[in-house]
C-alpha cells in the first residue's frame, strides 16, 4: 500500500478500482467523467447519490455507517473519457473541511485490497474537494492525489467541469 502526497500518482494494478472517502463527518462523494478538455460530455457524466451509475463509473452509498465510494471499471469507461475526478463535500450545509481530515482509500474493487491512501493536508474554509483523479496516460490507468479545495461547494466543482447546476430560486 502507498501513502500518497499531493500531486503524486501510482499506476493502477487493477482494472476495477474503488475510491472511498472517509471523514469524522458524513460526506457526499461524487465522480465526474472528463474528456481531454477537462469537461463532462453532458450532465450524465456526473455520478452521485441521485444518479448512481454512468458508463464505467458507479456510486455506492455507505449509508452513514461506512464511507461513500466511487467505483471505476477502466475496461468499461467509454472512449474519449480520459479522467474520472472523485470529489467530496461535507453533507451538512455550510460546513467546511476545517478540522476534518478526509482520507481517500483506493482499493482493488475485486478483492478489496488497498492500493493507496491519501489525506489532503491543511484544509480550512473549503466546502468541497477534488480528492483523487483516476486518469489514462499513454494507455495506462493511474491514480493521482489532488486535494484541490473549493470554497463554493460541490456546485463550484460541477460548474468548473461543465455540469449544469440549477441555482435555488431566491426566497
Image: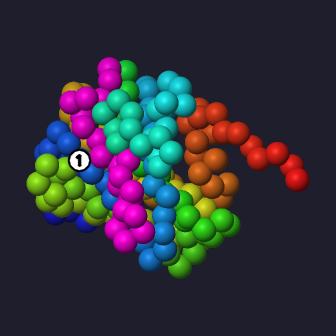
Q: Position of residue 144 (x, y in %)?
A: 33, 49
- Principal SS element in the magenta part? loop
Left or right? Give the position of 78 relative to 10: right
| Whether residue 130 is situated above or below residue 82 in the rendered picture | below
| Whether residue 153 is situated above or below residue 41 in the rendered picture | below
At a point 38% along the width and 47% down the height, the residue shown is 59
Q: In the rendered view of the protein, which quadrant contains the N terminus?
A: bottom left
At a point 60% along the width and 68% down the height, the residue shown is 92
Q: Position of residue 83 (x, y in %)?
A: 38, 35
Residue 107 in sight from this viewpoint: yes
Q: Judging from the image, what secondary structure is the residue with disc 1 in?
A: strand
Q: How many marks?
A: 1
User: Magenta includes 9?
Assistant: no
Q: Position of residue 168 (x, y in %)?
A: 77, 47
* Image quadrant in which you'd find residue 134: top left
Residue indicated by mark 1: 17
Q: Residue furthest right?
A: 171
| Whether residue 154 is situated above or below residue 41 in the rendered picture | below
| Magenta segment boundaries in residue numbering | 59-79
The crowd level at tag 1 (other Cα within 10 Å; few <14, some 14-19, many 20+) is: many
Amino acid at each position: 500500500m502507498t501513502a500518497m502526497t499531493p500531486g503524486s500518482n501510482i499506476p493502477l494494478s487493477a482494472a476495477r478500482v474503488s475510491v472511498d472517502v472517509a471523514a469524522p463527518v458524513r460526506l457526499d462523494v461524487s465522480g465526474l467523467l472528463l474528456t481531454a478538455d477537462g469537461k463532462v460530455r453532458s450532465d450524465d457524466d456526473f455520478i452521485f447519490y441521485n444518479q448512481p451509475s454512468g458508463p464505467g463509473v458507479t456510486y455506492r452509498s455507505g449509508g452513514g455507517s461506512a464511507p461513500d465510494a466511487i467505483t471505476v471499471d477502466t475496461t468499461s469507461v467509454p472512449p474519449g473519457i480520459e479522467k474520472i475526478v472523485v470529489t467530496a463535500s461535507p453533507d451538512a450545509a455550510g460546513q467546511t473541511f476545517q478540522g476534518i481530515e478526509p482520507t481517500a482509500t483506493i482499493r482493488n474493487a475485486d478483492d478489496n485490497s488497498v492500493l493507496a491512501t491519501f489525506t489532503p493536508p491543511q484544509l480550512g474554509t473549503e466546502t468541497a474537494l477534488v480528492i483523487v483523479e483516476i486518469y489514462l496516460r499513454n494507455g495506462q490507468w493511474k491514480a493521482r492525489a489532488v486535494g484541490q479545495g473549493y470554497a463554493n461547494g460541490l456546485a463550484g466543482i460541477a460548474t468548473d467541469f461543465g455540469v449544469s447546476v440549477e441555482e435555488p430560486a431566491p426566497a
